[in-house]
Image (cartoon, rainbow, N blue to C red):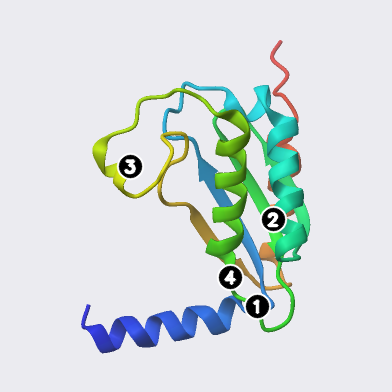
């Protein structure tokens, strides 16, 4: 993709996300870990700290052992999704202070080895997609009943 196309794409994306509702999936780097449910109070405190710094409305969230799904709405004119997730993830890492292995690249970038670098986000309108994602979070949060 040419640089001009990338800049146009970034501007379009920020306009879509500003004051928008978004669906996110954030994963732990090591999917076998259970940090999120074992340290859910630390995760909750990290969300609160991020909200105090940059307010947002959490519409739905489901926390699973190795990843979480979240639907949130940003204030009018605000599109800083990455900044909020950065605060949440770094706050969670600081609260854990785990002694996990970190590669030289992660050390140079001042990253912990807990989270995957990227997260998936999808802008939602207030139409069909929003209720579907909220309902999906509800369904995921209930354990499956097997006979």
Can you identify the residue that label 1 sits on? 78
Picture disc at residue 99: none
Q: CA distance from mark 2 to mark 3?
A: 23 Å
Viewer-closest of 117 and 45: 45
Q: Position of residue 95 (x, y in %)?
A: 63, 34
Callout 2 crowding tier (Cα within 10 Å): few <14, some 14–19, many ≥20: many
Q: Which residue is mark 2?
A: 50
Q: Which callout, 3 or 4, points at the residue further toward the start of the chain? A: 4
Residue at image point 33% right, 41% down: 107
Check residue 80 in the rendering and tell me which mark sits there, or answer none.
4
Q: For mark 4, does the 10 Å Cα neighbourhood hold few (<14), some (14 to 19), or many (20 or more) residues?
A: some
- Look at 46% across and 21% down and name the residue there: 32
Going from N to C along the chain, the mark reached first, 2 or 1, is 2
- Looking at the image, which residue is at 45% across and 85% down? 11
Q: Is residue 93 above or below residue 88?
A: above
Q: Is residue 60 left or right of residue 93?
A: right
Element marked by disc 1 = loop
Q: How many marks?
A: 4
Dot 3: what SS?
Answer: helix
- The quadrant in which the N terminus is found is bottom left
Residue under label 3: 106
CA separation in Å, label 2 and label 1: 14 Å
Of the image marks 2 and 3, the number of the one nearer the N terminus: 2
């Amino acid at each position: 993709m040419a640089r001009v196309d990338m800049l146009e794409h970034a501007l379009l994306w920020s306009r879509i996300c500003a004051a928008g509702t978004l669906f996110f999936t954030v994963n732990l780097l090591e999917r076998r870990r259970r940090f999120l449910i074992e340290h859910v109070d630390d995760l909750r405190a990290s969300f609160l700290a991020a909200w105090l710094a940059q307010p947002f409305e959490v519409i739905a969230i489901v926390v699973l052992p190795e990843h979480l799904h979240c639907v949130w709405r940003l204030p009018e004119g605000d599109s800083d999704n990455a900044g909020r997730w950065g605060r949440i993830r770094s706050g969670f890492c600081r609260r854990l202070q785990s002694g996990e292995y970190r590669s030289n690249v992660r050390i140079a970038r001042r990253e912990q080895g807990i989270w995957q670098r990227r997260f998936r986000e999808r802008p939602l309108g207030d139409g069909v997609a929003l209720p579907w994602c909220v309902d999906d979070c509800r369904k995921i949060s209930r354990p499956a009943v097997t006979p």
